[in-house]
Amino acid sequence: MKAARWSWNALAVALIGVSGLTMTQFAATQESSPKKPEAAQTAKPQAEKKADKKDGGQENRDRKGLSIFMRMKLDASQKILAGLALEDFELIQEGATKLEDMSTAEKWRVSNDPFFREHSTDFQKITKRLSKNAKEGKLEAAALTWMEATMKCIECHKWTRANLIAESPSR
């Protein structure tokens, strides 16, 4: 029985490690945005620059707000990861509840596309299940559910980069 418990704990730690690395790598890739070369910026006509400032000002504020929101999601994710590593079920539940609450916020809905809505709904179900597993003290189930949540995040962000960001007129 101890060997089985040890193997479950080893699996949970491995999954937690992979999850943490994945989220860290994802956050690093989201921080860097392609910069326009200096020459391309100076070559624009003056009227076009003014229009960009008017339109881009709101867009930049929206992006900054979304970036802050994404950081809050990462903070909640780190609580879950720490909770899994420390077997702190309250911390897991706190992070899961925060993500569940955030997933119903208006800022979360960056698209009304059916694919995005489906991923969002799935994510909400996963965070509810994660919270339930934490409440019941099921470490292995919580770790596996967290991996499922992480994969759902990766799938959705991959889709968002390919479909929303690629189509954005500012890029």
Image (spheres, rainbow, N blue to C red):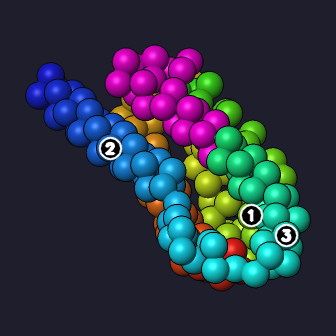
Residue 144 placement (x, y as % from top left) = 39, 45
Q: Which residues are magenta?
A: 70-91
Residue that protrudes farthest toward the left in the picture = 3
Residue 152 position, x and y percent, is 51, 59
Residue at 37% over, 18% down: 86
Is 128 or 85 nearer to us in this picture? 85
Inspect the image, locate mark 2, and give the three-letter code of the amino acid beneath it.
Answer: Leu
Residue wearing tag 1: 110
Label 2, on which residue?
21
Name the mark nearer the viewer: 2 or 3: 3
Give the secondary structure at mark 3: helix
Is residue 15 at least partly visible in the picture? no
- Quarter-of-image position of residue 108: bottom right
Q: Residue at x 76, y 81 (%)?
A: 45
Residue 123 position within the rendered picture, expressed as x and y whole percent measured from the top left = 61, 54
Residue at left 56%, top 32%?
75
Q: Name the amino acid type tagged 3.
A: Lys
Q: Earlier in the sequence, mark 2 or mark 1?
A: 2
Q: Earlier in the sequence, mark 3 or mark 1?
A: 3
* Mark 2 crowdedness (10 Å alpha carbons): few <14, some 14-19, many ≥20: few
Q: Which residue is mark 3?
A: 50
Disc 3 from disc 1: Cα separation = 27 Å
